[in-house]
Image (cartoon, grey):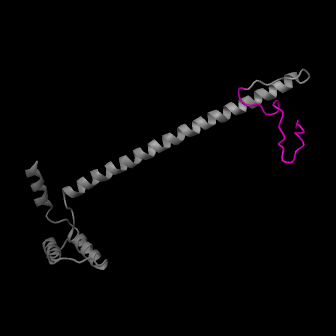
């Protein structure tokens, strides 16, 4: 129930303590209300407990998501480093791929050197009839075996 307040303009009305108990607060029980009032209080207390537990679970899950996100980024970076290590190990480019790479550079306005043009020309001539087969793969593989 609401109290009337002091009658002054702007005076706040206060809610009776038995209507909105705080969690863990002692609630006075009127003799006529008895069990119904106590059950309402227990229901409210259960609701407060559930909400508090829900807040804890949400905070914990948010922290776990952040940790998993950081781990996913680290794993992705490690994967990229590993892939780049394998890609730089051997240059497995066919003459056709070298021509396409050179044309891509030229289309994007990148200045190509004469050395790049000569290297692509040599790769096309060395490829013979099969421009899709990688060139110099045997020499690269034998060079890698000599280093290990």
19 lies left or right of 58: right
x and y percent of residue 145 in the render?
Answer: 10, 51
* Magenta stretch: helix, strand or loop mostly: loop
Task: State the residue in front, 79 or 131.
Answer: 79
Q: Determine which quarter of the picture holds residue 15.
A: top right
Q: Is residue 88 above or below residue 56?
A: below
Residue under the point 27% across and 78% down: 106
Q: Please tell me how many numbered marks the rendered image carries.
A: 0
**Residue 2: horizontal and vertical position, in percent?**
88, 38
Q: Nearer the viewer, residue 64 or 141?
A: 64
The residue lying furthest to the right in this view is 32
- Residue 126 lies, with reference to residue 91, above or below; the image says below
Instruction: Identify the residue shown where x is 67% and y is 33%.
Output: 50
Indicate yes or no whether the magenta region holds residue 18. yes
Q: Residue furthest left?
A: 146
Extent of the magenta region: 1-24
Left or right of 120: which side holds 47?
A: right
**Drawn side of residue 42 relative to residue 8, left or right:** left
The answer to whether residue 52 is above or below residue 105 is above
Q: Is residue 47 magenta?
A: no
Task: Report the quarter where the N terminus lies.
Answer: top right
Q: Which residue is found at the position 23% from the left and 69% from the top?
A: 132
């Amino acid at each position: 129930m609401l109290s009337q307040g002091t009658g002054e303009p702007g005076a706040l009305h206060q809610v009776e303590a038995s209507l909105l108990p705080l969690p863990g607060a002692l609630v006075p029980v009127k003799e006529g209300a008895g069990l119904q009032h106590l059950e309402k209080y227990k229901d409210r207390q259960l609701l407060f407990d559930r909400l508090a537990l829900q807040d804890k679970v949400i905070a914990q899950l948010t922290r776990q998501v952040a940790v998993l996100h950081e781990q996913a980024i680290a794993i992705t970076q490690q994967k990229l480093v590993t892939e780049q290590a394998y890609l730089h190990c051997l240059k497995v480019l066919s003459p056709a791929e070298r021509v396409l790479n050179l044309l891509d550079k030229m289309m994007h306005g990148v200045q190509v050197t004469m050395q790049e043009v000569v290297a692509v020309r040599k790769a096309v001539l060395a490829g013979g009839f099969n421009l899709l087969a990688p060139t110099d793969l045997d020499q690269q593989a034998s060079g890698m075996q000599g280093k290990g």
